[in-house]
């Protein structure tokens, strides 16, 4: 059996974590622990909840569909890492999965679906997105899970955005690309501003003329170039967040 010092399995839980806390895991994590990872009574795993750091826990009992564990020791204190937000026009399933998983791995703190005029997807399953984000957080070692915000229309999203917080529009159309900043310059500006920035990536069909007019009229909006090539929406999002981490984040 594995010892308590180096368990490989990490699971997210909503339960408050402290010394000696008992946690009952449900059917899905129990199946993962027993059928996939082949853990048994006496084995150890790591638990985190985004608030109380990361804890080593021991499996005390297994029954059909549940697993009882108890925290043994805190291995890591909760970090205070601050990453950018990512707003995006919802994408088709595979592309959206990539976006959510990679954004989580890269330290994005919140994900904001925004319905634009040319969006090809008009419904978002927030529970599925959260499950994807949780699994990515478990695997990459971060101590928090990005918040999945309520989907909003483009108009509602822009109307509610605070003027003190920068909004950086990625991969702009040819009509505004000439006035866009290079990514390194834009991220340098974002790093010196109050609060963390939000990157906004539109649909693969691009922005409508009315959306571009609305964006141009807002003083907190900056257009960002991501090189000479046309990027898919999920690629643009990943590239921008990677640039942020390299230039202003924890890389």
Image (cartoon, grey):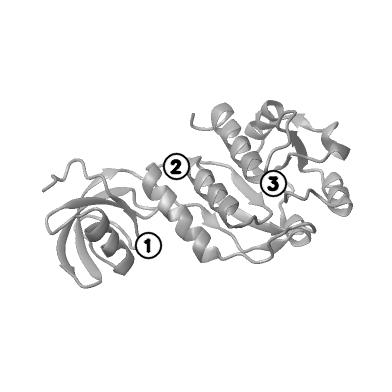
Q: Which residue lies at the image location 59% right of the left edge and 60% below the top edge?
A: 149
Whether residue 124 appears in this view of the structure is: yes
Q: Position of residue 96 (x, y in %)?
A: 58, 53
Residues at badges 3 and 2 in contact (C-beta under 8 Å)? no
Disc 3 is placed on an element classified as strand
Q: Earlier in the sequence, mark 1 or mark 2?
A: 1
Q: Residues within 10 Å of mark 1 (few under 14, many from 20)?
A: few
Which residue is pictured at 13% across the width and 59% down the height? 41
Q: Nearer the viewer, residue 70 or 229?
A: 229
Task: Note whether 196 is above or below 250 in the view shown.
Answer: below
Checking the image for residue 42, the label placed there is none
Determine the residue positioned at 50% across, 63% down: 128
Q: Secondary structure at mark 2?
A: loop
Counting residues from the start of the chain, the first of labels 3 and 2 encountered is 2
Which image quadrant is residue 155 in?
Answer: bottom right
Q: Nearer the viewer, mark 3 or mark 2?
A: 3
Q: Are marks 1 and 2 in contact (CB under 8 Å)?
A: no
Question: Can you give x and y, in whole percent of width and height, for residue 57 in the image?
Answer: 21, 53
Res 16 quadrant in image: bottom left
State how far apart marks 3 and 1 are (Cα): 29 Å
Identify the element where label 1 is drawn.
loop
In terms of image quadrants, where is residue 14?
bottom left
> Between 91 and 2, which is closer to the camera in this rendering?
91
Q: CA distance from mark 1 to mark 2?
A: 18 Å
Locate residue 156, reporting x and y percent: 75, 62
- 139 on left or right of 61: right
Which mark's residue is nearer the viewer, 3 or 1?
A: 3
Residue 169 percent coordinates (x, y) = 73, 42
Residue annotated with mark 2: 80
| Residue wearing tag 1 | 14
Q: Which mark is residue 200?
A: 3
Sort mark 2 into few (<14), some (14-19) or many (20+) by Cα contacts within 10 Å.
few
């Amino acid at each position: 059996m594995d010892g308590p010092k180096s368990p490989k399995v990490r699971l997210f839980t909503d339960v408050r974590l402290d010394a000696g806390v008992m946690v009952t895991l449900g059917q899905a994590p129990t199946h993962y622990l027993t059928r996939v990872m082949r853990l048994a009574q006496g084995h150890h795993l790591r638990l985190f909840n985004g608030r109380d750091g990361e804890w080593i826990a021991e499996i005390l009992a297994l029954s059909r569909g549940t697993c009882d564990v108890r925290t043994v020791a805190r291995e890591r204190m909760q970090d205070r890492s601050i990453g950018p937000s990512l707003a995006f026009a919802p994408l088709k399933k595979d592309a959206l999965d990539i976006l959510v998983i990679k954004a989580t791995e890269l330290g994005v703190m919140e994900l904001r679906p925004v319905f634009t005029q040319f969006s090809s997807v008009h419904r978002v399953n927030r529970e599925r997105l959260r499950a994807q984000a949780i699994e990515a957080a478990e695997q990459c070692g971060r101590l928090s899970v990005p918040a999945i915000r309520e989907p909003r229309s483009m108009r509602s999203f822009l109307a509610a955005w605070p003027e003190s917080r920068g909004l950086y529009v990625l991969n702009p159309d040819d009509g505004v690309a000439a006035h866009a900043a290079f990514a390194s310059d834009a991220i340098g500006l974002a790093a010196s501003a109050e609060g963390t920035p939000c990157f906004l990536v539109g649909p693969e069909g691009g922005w409508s003329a009315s959306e571009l007019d609305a964006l141009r009229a807002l003083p907190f909006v900056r257009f960002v170039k991501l090189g000479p090539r046309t990027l898919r929406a999920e690629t643009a999002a990943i590239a921008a967040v990677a640039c942020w981490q390299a230039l202003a984040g924890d890389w």
